[in-house]
Amino acid sequence: MNTQLEDIVSLAKRRGFIFQGSEVYGGLAGTWDYGPLGVTLKRNIINLWWRIFVESRDDMYGVDAAILMNPKVWQASGHVDTFTDPLVECSECKGRFRADKIDTSKCPTCGKAGTFGEPRQFNMMFKTNVGPVEDENSVAYLRPETAQGIFTNYKNIVDTLYPDLPFGVAQVGKAFRNEISPRDFIFRSREFEQMEIEYFVHPDKWQESFDALLADIHAILESLGLPKDKIHELDVPENDRAHYSKRTIDIEFDFPIGREELLGLAYRTDFDLSNIQRVSGKNIEYTVKGTNEKFIPHVIEPSFGVERMVMAVLSSAYREDEINGEKRIYLALPEHLAPVKYAVSPLLKNKPELVAKAREVYECLKKKHRAVMWDDNGNIGKRYRRQDEIGTPYCVVIDFDSFEDDTVTVRNRDTTQQTRTSITDLLS
Ligand code: ATP
């Protein structure tokens, strides 16, 4: 179906997935807060990623580096000089835009033609000062990517664990970019989260690791329930790639806002490690065990944005249908991502014996699945509507028959079918 962005934004707010950042004070552009259901959905996505890319493999190591880093990191990496977007300002309404994202012949806000001058390069890193003195020497940046926290720890990992090549280092964490025009809900935020891997390889063997990681990326996108026909590989042509990259594939996704970048996979050669060696003066070479072969490893980088994953998952799961002539909205989330797996309720909340029995079932299910919600608000129809919008796969209702034969009604979110199931089967 053709999902509109407004449908996703409105459901996310209505049901407590995602709110505008600082909403009570009128908001802060480009920031978003995750509510009770959103935080669980986001964690489920991150945990799945970590399980697949780190925990279930022998060749991956995790790090969690500080967000504030020595400014030399961003000088060596090129961010201080080149992490820029072209900015144009309208001389009429003073609106500021990214020159490469609009038609600059006419201002998109005031509609006046010919109001833009030449673009100037705007650095997207947020600056701050470390310590009590605010001067040139105390400048630090909020990291615009998690990758550099991996590169700066590369030597620590080799010195402590000495893994055989190829091996990867993974990190999940916040990144900050002072985007000129944050837009499209969480798609382009000023504060967001990344899940990144730097996979270190022998320079002659980059291609096989690149291909293997590309296959792993497709596998995780499938586990996230993203439809194959909405996923596209864009082999980025040489003149659009960073100068150090020998190959980059952007994975694009058909979002409600159109086809846009979901994540990237880049072969970054030895650019980052060589820069660290040059600027720090420390030897970064890797020595192959039992030999004298030494070189600076090359790197393959899969770089995922958590917000874009959340948006892809929400927009693929969003469904509308009609039940008994009434419009229904539901989220067909894969069970392992759903923030609530089971909602449990008594048929009537003013019958203490029903409530007590339902509580018993609830406690047992909660012990087993944790993500179980007690829901006795409104009538059963309203509870189903609410749970459908949250994406809860199963609603369990305890009624008077439950006393007769120890069964409950289990209602399936996608089919709306209700089946009688024995409590023993439900809990086994
Ligand atoms: P774009 O071209 O859309 O600005 P990018 O090429 O600058 O993205 P990268 O620097 O490759 O992005 O960052 C890696 C990933 O981080 C992106 O694929 C995306 O998922 C995520 N990302 C980057 N910028 C943002 C942002 N402003 N808000 C949310 N996610 C982002």
Image (cartoon, helix red, strand yellow):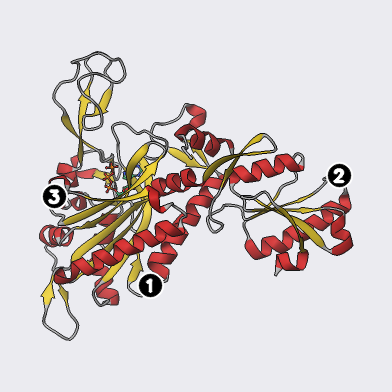
* Dot in front, 1 or 3: 3
Question: In the image, what residue type sits under mark 2?
Answer: Asn
Check disc 3: other Cα within 10 Å, few if <14, some if 14-19, many if 20+: few
Judge from the rendering whether residue 329 lies leftward or rightward of residue 259; answer left or right: right
Residue drawn at 23 percent across, 67 percent down: 200
In this view, which residue lies farthest toward the front?
325
Residue drawn at 43 percent across, 58 percent down: 222
Percent x, y of residue 274: 13, 61
* Dot in front, 2 or 3: 3
Percent x, y of residue 174: 37, 49
Q: Which residue is mark 1?
A: 57
* Marks 1 and 2, how far apart at CA: 52 Å
Question: In the image, what residue type sits under mark 3?
Answer: Glu
State which tag comes first along the sequence, 1 or 2.
1
Ligand 1's quadrant: top left
SS state under label 1: loop
Check disc 2: other Cα within 10 Å, few if <14, some if 14-19, many if 20+: few
Say which quadrant the C terminus sits in.
Answer: bottom right
Residue drawn at 76 percent across, 68 percent down: 424
Percent x, y of residue 150: 28, 60
Task: Give me the disc on residue 350.
Answer: 2
Residue 84 visible to an observer of this rendering? yes
Q: Which residue is mark 3?
A: 238
